[in-house]
Image (cartoon, rainbow, N blue to C red):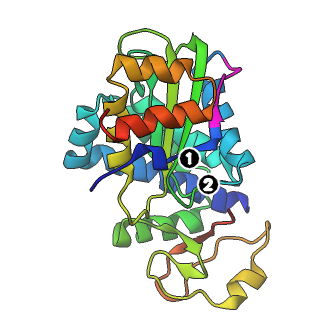
Amino acid sequence: MHDQLLLLVTLQDLDTLIRETQDEARRTELESMGFSMDNIEPLHTARKKLAGKVDVRYLRVYDRLLGKYGRAVVPVENRTCLGCFQSVPPSFFSEITADTPVKVCENCGRILYLLTS
Amino acid sequence: MTIRLSEFFEEDLFIPELTSRDKEGALKEMVDALVKAQRITEGDILLQMLRQREHLGSTGIGRGVAVPHGRTLAITRLAVIFARSAEGIEFDSMDGKPVHLIFLTVAPPQERSNLYLPVLGKIVEMVKSAKNRRRLQGAKDFDEIAEVLEEADDGA
């Protein structure tokens, strides 16, 4: 996987976790199970550090998509973008290699991540 | 929604005895089991997410149990990896005690079946029973583990 895509996937996972801490209902549910979710600050620090490693061009796209959709990076599964649920054209698969830079869905513009397992 | 825990545990995602003695090593060993079972290819992505989750607060919930969890793009469907440590692992648990039973639970962010939180809740509920914990720790093989889970599912 291209290192920039790897960073963006990791950033998306971190943003998903941060969002979970901000969702009052979800947070309450997890805390009621006995899970501690108090130490939020290190997550913001980690996010800043991680975002600093992403190419500015891609980060700009990521942040815009995150603001627009809530999720900027989405998987491709069964040849479908799991953001907009439209088919991904065959060219996406023929062009994707370990050196492929970040690619976006032609329909919704979200950053695509090909699930290979 | 009726959740049957026994349906989420798999033999190839069961580690009878962890070799690691610390939290980081245990998490890595469990993520490696997922890679080995070909459930994920990018183990590092998952490991990073789990580390961040632990920074937020330990998932060691006491009574010798930890339930590390989170959502990651690295996985296609919900998975539970169950591991044991007879000696115990320092997990920064709430009661300060080492953990002997670890249930790593991961799900994709786009999971449509919404099983993630109910499964987590069910695991937490199941391990509240001292008898269940004792039986899970003492089980000789996965069949015995499955038996405990099925009995818990049936409310026995």
Main SS class of the magenta portion in the image: loop
Quarter location, residue B24: top right
Q: Which mark is residue A7?
A: 2
Residue pointed to by mark 1: A50
- Estimate how packed mark 1 is, as few (under 14), some (14 to 19) or many (20 or more) residues with alpha carbons within 10 Å: some
Amino acid, disc 1: Leu
Amino acid, disc 2: Leu
Quarter location, residue A95: bottom right
Residue drawn at x 42%, y 25% is B58
* Residue B123 spot, x, y in % from top left: 38, 36
Which quadrant is home to the C terminus of chain B?
Answer: top left
Q: Which mark is residue A96?
A: none
Specify the segment rendered in magenta. B14-20
Q: Chain of mark 2?
A: A
Q: In screen coordinates, is B107 left or right of B42?
A: left
* Residue B62 spot, x, y in % from top left: 37, 17
Contact check, label 2 and label 1, Cβ < 8 Å: yes
The answer to whether residue A107 is magenta is: no
The image shows a total of numbered marks equal to 2
